[in-house]
Image (spheres, rainbow, N blue to C red):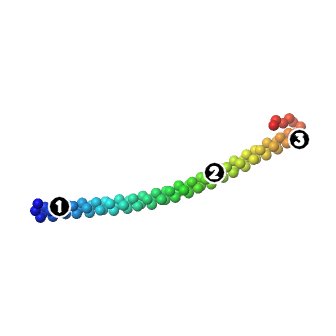
Amino acid sequence: MNKYEIKYLLETMTSSVDRLTDALGKSSHHISELWTEIGEKQSAISNQRYEIRRLKEKLYECMKKDHNNKLEEADFEKRFKEFVGESVDN
């Protein structure tokens, strides 16, 4: 190999290294953006889990109140029927 061929190969390799370095930089930047996006989505998921938990607790409270209201209504109806003199099924 003469010096011109060696120089050409060196320039070719330098160009390849530059392209690979640029591609690596772009990939690193893209990966960094993806990690940021993942963090934001994890935060949103955490907030949604908290909201779901809060709504489930609220639903449980409403169901409990509804059940208690039905019990009170049934008890009232039973007492009323006893007062009026109708037969009551326990």
**Tag 2: Cα neighbours inside 10 Å, few (<14), some, or many (≥20)?**
few
Q: In this view, does 3 lie to the left or right of 33?
A: left
Residue 25 numbered mark, or none: none
Relative to 30, say whether 56 is above or below.
Answer: above
Under tag 2, what secondary structure? helix
Under tag 3, what secondary structure? helix
- Determine the residue positioned at 84% across, 36% down: 88
Relative to 31, say whether 82 is above or below.
Answer: above
**Residue in the foreground of this view, choosing between 14 and 55:** 14
Q: Is residue 10 left or right of residue 35?
A: left
Q: How far apart are marks 3 and 1 (CA)?
A: 108 Å
Q: In which quarter of the image is residue 89?
A: top right
| Quarter containing the N terminus | bottom left
Query: In the rendering, at what x and y percent does residue 77 appear?
Result: 82, 42
Provide the residue designation for mark 1.
Answer: 9
Q: In this view, does 70 lie to the left or right of 41?
A: right
Residue 56 numbered mark, or none: 2
Q: In which quarter of the image is residue 54?
A: bottom right
Counting residues from the start of the chain, the first of labels 2 and 1 encountered is 1
- Determine the residue positioned at 81% across, 37% down: 90
Query: In the rendering, at what x and y percent does residue 29 appear?
Result: 37, 62
- Determine the residue positioned at 75% across, 44% down: 70
